[in-house]
Image: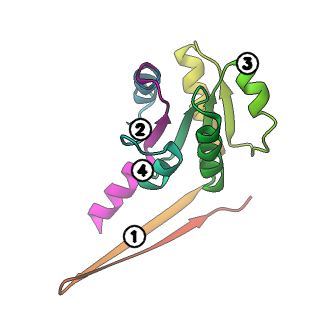
């Protein structure tokens, strides 16, 4: 069971950065790494909203410069999974996106941003996240594998 706990901890420390810009991913990824998180990005030709399922991140960072339909689907996926979401947008993009009904686990930033302010925004988002406990049990037998899991969240 120890290996599964390590795998679960890894997922809790992963931040998904969704952007079509490799420069954005490099800069923001460097700042995320300084905050102690592992960085993941959507796979080649994978929609960013779908990569939330594959990567199971603890935080999603969304670059609003992409196509609006992709950004909206990513936001919906992150909100539906109750993941903290950091949206990086220009003032014009933010004015449009703020008309969307979003919960309090969403923060907005504009680039350029000081590293200290970025760290504070991430820490604040992670503090808002509900406490989650997840355990996975894997049973292997004669040619069969069964995975079962339970997730418990605090309700506020």
Asked if the residue at tag 4 contacts the one at tag 3, i.e. Cβ–Cβ closer than 8 Å, the answer is no
Q: Which quadrant does the C terminus fall into? A: bottom right
Task: Compare marks 4 and 1 and give the one earlier in the sequence.
Answer: 4
Q: CA distance from mark 3 to mark 2?
A: 25 Å
Residue of label 2? 41
The type of colouring in the image is rainbow
> Nearer the observer, disc 1 or disc 3?
3
Q: Counting other residues with Cα less than 10 Å from the Cα at mark 4, is it few (<14), some (14-19), or many (20 or more)?
A: some
| Residue 118 percent across, percent down from the top left | 57, 23
Residue of label 3? 91
| Residue 136 percent across, percent down from the top left | 40, 70
> Nearer the observer, disc 4 or disc 1?
4
Measuring 50% from the left and 35% from the top, which residue is drawn there? 18
Q: Which mark is residue 55?
A: 4
> Nearer the observer, disc 3 or disc 4?
3
113 lies left or right of 47: right
| Residue 1 percent across, percent down from the top left | 29, 69
As displayed, is residue 59 above or below residue 23?
below
Q: Secondary structure at mark 4?
A: helix
User: Which residues, given as a range, are shown in magenta?
Assistant: 1-23
Q: Secondary structure at mark 2?
A: loop
């Amino acid at each position: 069971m120890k290996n599964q706990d390590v795998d679960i901890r890894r997922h809790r420390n992963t931040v998904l950065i969704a952007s079509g810009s490799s420069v954005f991913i490099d800069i923001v990824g460097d700042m995320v790494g300084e905050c102690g998180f592992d960085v993941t990005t959507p796979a080649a030709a994978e929609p960013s909203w779908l990569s939330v399922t594959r990567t199971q991140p603890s935080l999603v960072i969304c670059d609003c410069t992409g196509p609006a339909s992709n950004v909206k689907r990513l936001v919906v996926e992150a909100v539906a999974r109750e993941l903290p979401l950091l949206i990086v947008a220009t003032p014009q993009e933010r004015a449009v996106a703020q008309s969307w009904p979003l919960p309090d686990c969403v923060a907005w930033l504009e680039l350029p941003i000081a590293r200290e302010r970025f760290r504070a925004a991430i820490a604040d988002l992670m503090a808002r996240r509900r406490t989650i406990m997840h355990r996975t049990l894997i049973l292997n037998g004669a040619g069969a594998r069964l995975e079962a899991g339970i997730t418990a969240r605090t309700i506020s």
